Amino acid sequence: MARRQLCRYDPVMSSSGDLTVSTPAPRATSRRFAARREAIISAAVNEINRRGVRGMSLAHVAAPLGVVPTAVMYYFRNKEELAAAVYLKSIAQWDALVAAAEREETGPERVKAFIRGYFNFREAVKAARADDIADMSDARALASPAVNEAYVAMFRCARRLTPRRDGESRADRNGRTVLLLAELTWTPAWLFNWRPEDYPRLGARMADVLVNGLAADGAESGDQTFAGVRLEPQGTDSSSNAFLQAATQLINDEGYHGASVDRISARLKVTKGAFYHYNATKDDLVVACFQRTFDMMWRAIDAAEAAGGSGLQVLTFIAGVLVRQQLGEAPLLRTSALSTVPESVRAQLLNQLRRITIRLASILCDGIADGSIRPVDTSVAAQMITAAINAASEVAYFLPDGQSPDTASHYVRTLFAGLRPED
């Protein structure tokens, strides 16, 4: 019980059995005022998930509610205040899921309960019985101290769900927590392929992979140093590559709309004229950033398969190289940004990502066939590998000051060995 007292919200079960949370209002309000405020927050969640926090406007939020933007400002002074309210409510929803899972006695059971609760929640969202959670991927772009503090508090509570290992560092445990949260936050990218009735089954299969890992007992994962692997092609124009890397880092930190032409140019200390000398439009540059990322992912896959080995060794090689790239100075573009790019190019980019995920599923099948991978649902496990690679850059934000362990190896090892305590 003492452990749970640090979490700021407790779950509330509605009459239908769904998990809900009650967030405190900033001041005493009438029931009608509070209901209208919650409706605005719900509409803003949908817009943030569709456009990102910087792409959302008060007009976007007002439109589905049938009101004018000034009506929204009666409840929230500006877009930033509304976005902060959205994120605080979403963090409270995560807090409630964590608190419910903390009731279990063991680490593996807590992880399973957390995942089960989340998939039940996603089913309730699909049935319009619960409000969705906002995508937190560019919450940092809001630069809200209250949001940042609440997220860190939630993260610390979620960290207690993972089983402890003797002698592990805080950095290693933070990495495992990033992985746990990342697997769940990635699910909207692929759950649309399934019926809501399948969600409990999918949750159970994800929990099995997260707790027990992908590797079969006794299977050798191979070398995790990944020395000598180069994902950036040789002979790349340095100026063009500088724009690609600057835009990638800004989109990862600020979202698609936060990476404006002015911001990209300022980061490189060049004029807007220089920007347009190398790039026809911002959208062309963003597409090029995604193409660079997909090309690098394919290079990792091709290099791993050329090196040979078991299915486990091939997958460990792929994940290790790409996670190391994410933690370096020239990371991959986070594919979660796909949700906020213009719809005119989104479908094409999603198809390219889908091909990569299908290949990962095929390699998983190879590993199951040769005995190096446990029998798992390859369609779920392939998405989990993609999610882990995508979120690896988050680990850097949770490293203790002055500590820089071999994060890539520990993070990848968790994906394949699981979250269970070591024997």
Image (cartoon, rainbow, N blue to C red):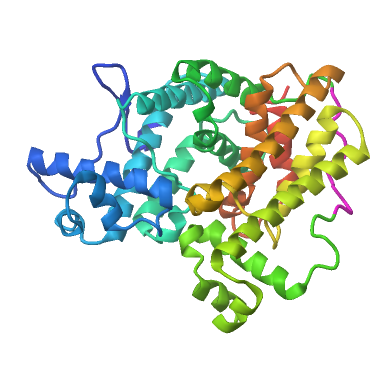
Is 111 placed above or below 75 here? above
Main SS of the magenta part reads loop
Is 66 placed above or below 213 here? below
Q: Quadrant of residue 17?
A: top left
Q: Residue furthest left?
A: 30
Q: Is residue 226 magenta?
A: yes
Decide which of 10, 205 is in the foreground and name it. Answer: 205
Residue at 69%, 25% in the rendered image: 213
Q: Is residue 375 magenta?
A: no
Q: Is residue 122 left or right of residue 237?
A: left
Q: Which quadrant: the N terminus?
A: top left
Q: Which quadrant: the C terminus?
A: top right
Which range is magenta?
219-229
Residue 271 in view (yes/no) = no
Is 203 placed above or below 352 here? above
Q: Is residue 295 left or right of residue 38?
A: right
Q: Is residue 237 left or right of residue 284?
A: right
Residue at 86%, 52% in the rendered image: 229
Q: Position of residue 412 (x, y in %)?
A: 72, 39
Q: Quadrant of residue 39?
A: top left
Residue at 45%, 37% in the rendered image: 157
Q: Position of residue 120 (x, y in %)?
A: 42, 21
Decide which of 235, 114 is in the foreground and name it. Answer: 235
Residue at 70%, 32% in the rendered image: 358
Q: Quadrant of residue 249?
A: bottom right
Q: Is residue 59 left or right of residue 380?
A: left
